[in-house]
Amino acid sequence: MSIIFSSVAALFMGVLALFVRMKASRKPVSTKKILLPPVFMSTGALMFLHPYFRVTGMEILEAVIVGMMFSILLIKTSKFELREQAIYLKRSKAFGFILIGLLLIRLLLKTILSQSIDVGQLSGMFWILAFGMIVPWRLAMYLQYKKLSLKLNEGKPILLEE
C-alpha cells in the first residue's frame, strides 16, 4: 500500500515540477532560484536519523550514480538565454518528455525493487537518487548562469544575494 501511495505522490510531484518549470521560464532567473531548491531538499536527509530509512554504503553509491546519470538529461535540456537585459531559462519541448520519462523509470524501478528491498530503505534510496540528480543539475545551471551573467554585466562579478 505504501508503494502505491509513494508512487502517486511521485507522479503528483513530477507533474507539479513540470508546471513550475514552465512557469519559471516566463521570469528572469536568479542565483537564488537556481541554488535554493537543493538546499531546501537537503532537509529531507533528516529522514536518515530514523533507522527505518537507513541504507547501506553500496545502496548510497548505486542511488548517487543513477541520480547523476539522470541529471545528464536534465543538464542537456536546461539552457539559458539573454532577453530584455536579463537571463531567462529557455523552454525546451524535450524537458517535459524527459521529466516524465525519468519519473516513469523511477516508478518502474520502485515497483521492481520494492519486492526485494524494504520500503523504508527504498524511500531513502530514492531520496538519494533525487538529490544526486538535482545537485549536479543545479550546479551545471549555476555555472551556465554565472557565465551568461558575466557576459551580461560586461565582466562584473555576480552576487549570490540576487
Image (tube, grey):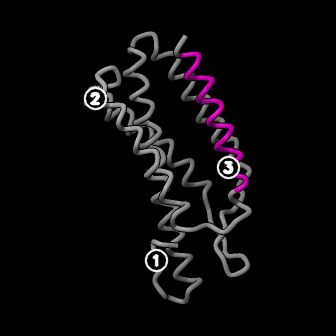
Q: Which amino acid does label 1 sit on?
A: Leu
- Left or right of 24 on screen, residue 136: left
* Secondary structure beneath label 3: helix
User: Over which residues does the magenta segment extend?
Assistant: 3-23
Q: Which amino acid does label 3 sit on?
A: Val
* Secondary structure beneath label 2: helix
* Depth order, front residue of 83/27: 27
Q: Does 11 sit above or below residue 143?
A: above
Sequence-wise, which precedes: disc 1 or disc 3? 3
* Depth order, front residue of 87/96: 87
- Left or right of 36 on screen, residue 87: right
Residue at 48% in and 59% down? 35
Q: Mark 1 points at which residue?
A: 159
Residue at 54% in and 54% down? 75
Q: Name the residue under label 2.
A: 58
Residue at 43% in and 36% down? 129
